[in-house]
Image (cartoon, grey):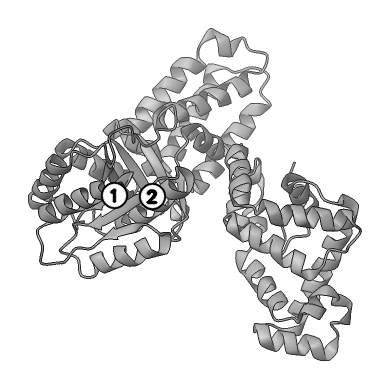
Amino acid sequence: MFDNLQQRLGRVLTNLRGQGRLSEDNIKDTLREVRMALLEADVALPVVRAFIEQIRAKAMGEEVMRSLTPGQMLIKIVHDELVQVMGEASAGLNLATRPPAVILMAGLQGSGKTTSVAKLARWLMERQKKSVMLVSCDVYRPAAIDQLQTLSGEVGATFFPSRGDQDPLHIANQALDAARKQYKDVLIVDTAGRLHVDAAMMDEIRDLHAALDPIETLFVVDSMTGQDAANTAKAFDDALPLTGVILTKADGDARGGAALSIRHITGKPIKFLGIGEKTGALEPFHPDRVASRILGMGDVLSLVEEVQRKVDQDQAQKLVKKLKAGKGFDLTDFRDQLQQMGAMGGMAGLLDKLPGMGQIPDHVKNQVNDREVVKLIAIINSMTPQERAFPDIVKGSRKRRIAAGSGTQVQDINRLLKQFTQMQKVMKKMKGGGMAKMLRAMSGRLPGGLPPGGFR
């Protein structure tokens, strides 16, 4: 997300860093470039105007003009203003009510609403340790109820059954009664999406809102629609008291216009970002961290949280003990490390959060290929336990068998063994040590060609 904006702003702000002093002319030139970058990112015009005026007023202030590092001061102003536009602090869910806390989900068809219901349920169960019930009041879209039932099973939430011939209001009231009787902490209600905002849809969702009195009413919107996402959210908010927004398909949105427009236009905070199709691909929205990513400063805090949450600590400790005991790092260990990386969103997800990645050329970043990691895991899985423990025995006929079993070529096996030998040398020197140390050590040796110096 924000790739285009990051590149444009990155170039503008890099030129500023070395400036010994700022004049009205170079501030004017900088703001023109920032304005163009925001418009290209499909940020709504009123938001761009307000953003530029705020920066201009602060940049012309005495504090900046007299600063020893005026370029850095201006970058800080741009960062702070980005945070201001997106909402100063992370707006979490408000569940402070008598259980069950009802969350009503609204949105247009195709925005990823039903999937977001399941993602939110999983997030609440895993991070907040809540018991969650899901119900679908979408009696219009074929298979909408079946889809939510399948997703409920996938995430482990309780599903309240409904049918396409029932009244949505009746379904909602029954589900609320069942959630109370089963002592559920949260009831998430999926409502019908439409192809556009229409009166009938608004009347139905207003009736549901009045009956359920939800503590959270979240609008789910596709970030790929840019500033239209903000305008649609505004239309919903005018009819329904929204408490926040879930921005979906953020991983496919290279512009970021929706994220920068929604808060200003609707006054409602973005609460979550959908960053993939899997049910675990939901992130709380932190304006300060997103602003840092836009300006190429990375998001190390989110990366650390992800490592703590997703890395199997027991497995990591076993590897440390094994290395300390003088036992070698084998191909099974190598596969485990690759799988852990996949659990953290893959190479692309890791790189997105690292500082300075915006300055790395596209052709280098494009070499970082998660498909290559999947291929390596398939190769290792095609080996026997003996071959994984003693890679030196993998010669001609064994290589041909492994290549056939994993759907790869013999040269792929050779490449894996070469990368593994390099990793073995690194592990010998490390004798264990945290993920950060390991990531630094793996720099330049990872499949897909991570550029050396990518980690600091």
Camera sees residue 342: yes
Above/below status of 375 relative to 21? below
Left or right of 106 in this view: 442: right
Between residue 221 and residue 260, name the one nearer to us: 221
Residue 335 sits in which quadrant? bottom right
Residue at (69% x, 89% y) in the render: 404
Question: Which amino acid, by three-letter code, is at mark 2?
Answer: Leu
Check disc 2: other Cα within 10 Å, few if <14, some if 14-19, many if 20+. many
Residue at (62% x, 51% y) in the render: 350
Check disc 1: other Cα within 10 Å, few if <14, some if 14-19, many if 20+. many
Question: Which amino acid, by three-letter code, is at mark 1?
Answer: Ile
Instruction: Pinpoint residue 375: horizontal percent, then vertical percent.
Output: 65, 73
Secondary structure type for disc 1: strand
Left or right of 130 in this view: 434: right
Between residue 194 and residue 92, name the one nearer to us: 92
Mark 1 and mark 2 lie on one chain; the one further toward the N terminus is 2
Residue 229 has which mark?
none
The residue that disc 1 covers is 188
Residue at (66% x, 76% y) in the render: 378
Instruction: Pinpoint residue 89: horizontal percent, then vertical percent.
Output: 44, 28
Left or right of 68 in this view: 186: left
Secondary structure type for disc 2: helix
Residue 347 sits in which quadrant? bottom right
Camera sees residue 448: no
Residue 120 has which mark?
2
Residue at (61% x, 9% y) in the render: 66
| Disc 1 and disc 2 in contact, CB within 8 angstroms | yes
Q: Estimate the spatial distance between the alpha carbons at disc 1 and disc 2, rounded to whole Å.
A: 9 Å
Instruction: Pinpoint residue 440: horizontal percent, then vertical percent.
Output: 77, 48
